[in-house]
Image (cartoon, rainbow, N blue to C red):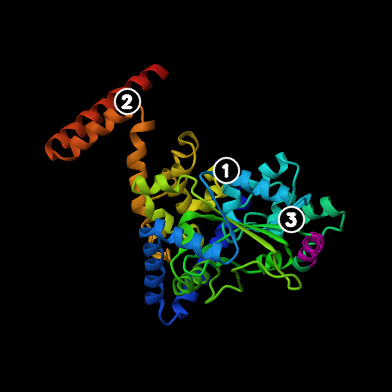
Amino acid sequence: MLVDGSTRRALQRLSRLAADASAHAWADEENSVALRQAAAKARQVALENLPAYLEQLETSASGNGVQVHWADGAQEANRLIIEIQQASAAPEAVRNHSQLLEEISLDRAAKANNIRLIRLHPGDQILELAGSRSSHPVWPTAHLRIDEISTATQRRWRVPITYDPDILASTIRMPLRRSLLRSYTAIIGLHFAVADTGDLVCLDNDGHNASLVSFSRHLICLLSLEQVVATTSDLHHLVRAYAHSAWGRPLPAYVTQVRQPTPPGIDGPREIHLIIMDNKRSHMFAEGYGEILRCIGCGACLNVCPIYPLIGGEGYGESPYSGPRGAALNPLLLRPDLANQQPYLSTACSACKPVCPVDIDLPRLLHEQRHRLAPSHASWQERTLFWIWRRLLKRPTLFRLGMRVANRLNRITHRGQGTKSD
Ligand code: SF4
């Protein structure tokens, strides 16, 4: 479960750099408290009125000429994407870097349906070449060393081994540009959608979302239902908060905003589909864990978590969501046997709480998850022991007596073992 030494050092270095950059960006922000409050409020307002905003989004987007679909789960979302892609008759599609697309395992579904799905983000390409998977929502290749990236690149394109990041980047980007130029269908996982305007929004640092939107003729957008925001003004607060926490800068390098299909003669998609997916979110609300759905995926909680660099992204099993956010979310998202231990991937240090730009109380959520899950996997012996322990803690005299008895038993046991070995 623990990652090897070099991966651990790479993740620790990344965490330090990203956390420092974010702390500086927030310190330089004149109205940091107001911005955090506005971002948290924007998420809270959206979640408290979710059905109404989703309905409004459907109306606005349909009015803009976007075809809106609803998906109950990952399987249905994949089915819709595959059907739309097949109707376009293109043999391949290009996708963006998105944890939402990872959540539904889109690549697997595309492969099963003989669709060639190309990942346009260079980081995703590197992961594919290295046979690895993303370990961080913002810095997907953070756990890989440059020699691993270089070897994977050399093996794929038979280029000389180099440790020059610029040469490596252009080697990886060149074939991606060719794929982009012939791309017909683009599939993107969104960051937000605005209820009152129907705008579909993606943030990134390298412009790959803008390229995907401009070059595609069919655009398929996936949104999980909690990503809706009420107004453009709420969107602005969230975009700024995201940039501070994710990249340590006041604004993202690119904000890609799509509203309607473009007419012939102008770059952009002629046809836009929006798939709004539930995938257990409604259950999370019903079970009282709606707070975790405020998350905007900035990765700030991962950067301060002492456990995350020790186990990396793979420590969180099949889910693309890692760190404290993943530990709180995954037991609600995955099958119980796959994620019920994850709330224990925490030292209870609470370092994740103050860095969250939308004020999610992750320590409390983790604690509640442990409480909820404990009876389901603790043995009867453990449960009995803790039952006795709880009662002893409430009665000091009994506790001291219990400790004396335990010490005595301990000594007797050790003496017995010593005698045997003699
Ligand atoms: S829980 Fe908060 S800090 Fe962690 S990824 Fe989500 S928004 Fe960012």
Q: Please tell me which residue lies in front, 259 or 10.
A: 259
Residue at x-position 56% and y-position 44%: 74
* Upstream in sequence: badge 3 or badge 1: 1
Labelled disc at residue 380: 2
Q: Residues within 10 Å of mark 1 (few under 14, many from 20)?
A: some
Left or right of residue 380, residue 124 in this image: right
**Magenta stretch contains residue 404:** no
In the image, is residue 250 above or below residue 66? below
Labelled disc at residue 76: 1
Q: Which residue is mark 3?
A: 149
Secondary structure under the numbered disc 3 in the rendered image: helix
Q: Position of residue 54 (x, y in %)?
A: 45, 58
Q: Position of residue 215 (x, y in %)?
A: 74, 66
Left or right of residue 32, residue 314 in this image: right
**Magenta stretch contains residue 180:** yes
Q: For the residue marked with disc 2, what is the amino acid?
A: Trp
Q: Please tell me which residue lies in front, 325 or 19.
A: 325
* Upstream in sequence: badge 1 or badge 2: 1
Q: For the residue marked with disc 1, what is the amino acid?
A: Glu
Cβ–Cβ below 8 Å for labels 1 and 2? Answer: no
Q: Position of residue 50 (x, y in %)?
A: 40, 57
Would you say the magenta stretch is mainly helix, strand or loop?
Answer: helix
Secondary structure under the numbered disc 2 in the rendered image: helix
Q: Quadrant of the C terminus?
A: top left
In the image, is residue 259 above or below residue 7? below
Separation of residues labelled 1 and 2 (CA atoms): 40 Å
Q: For the residue marked with disc 3, what is the amino acid?
A: Ile
Task: Examine the rendering and report whether any part of residue 406 can be seen.
Answer: yes
Residue at x-position 82% and y-position 62%: 178
Q: Residues within 10 Å of mark 3 (few under 14, many from 20)?
A: many
Q: Which residues are magenta?
A: 167-182
Q: Residues within 10 Å of mark 2 (few under 14, many from 20)?
A: few
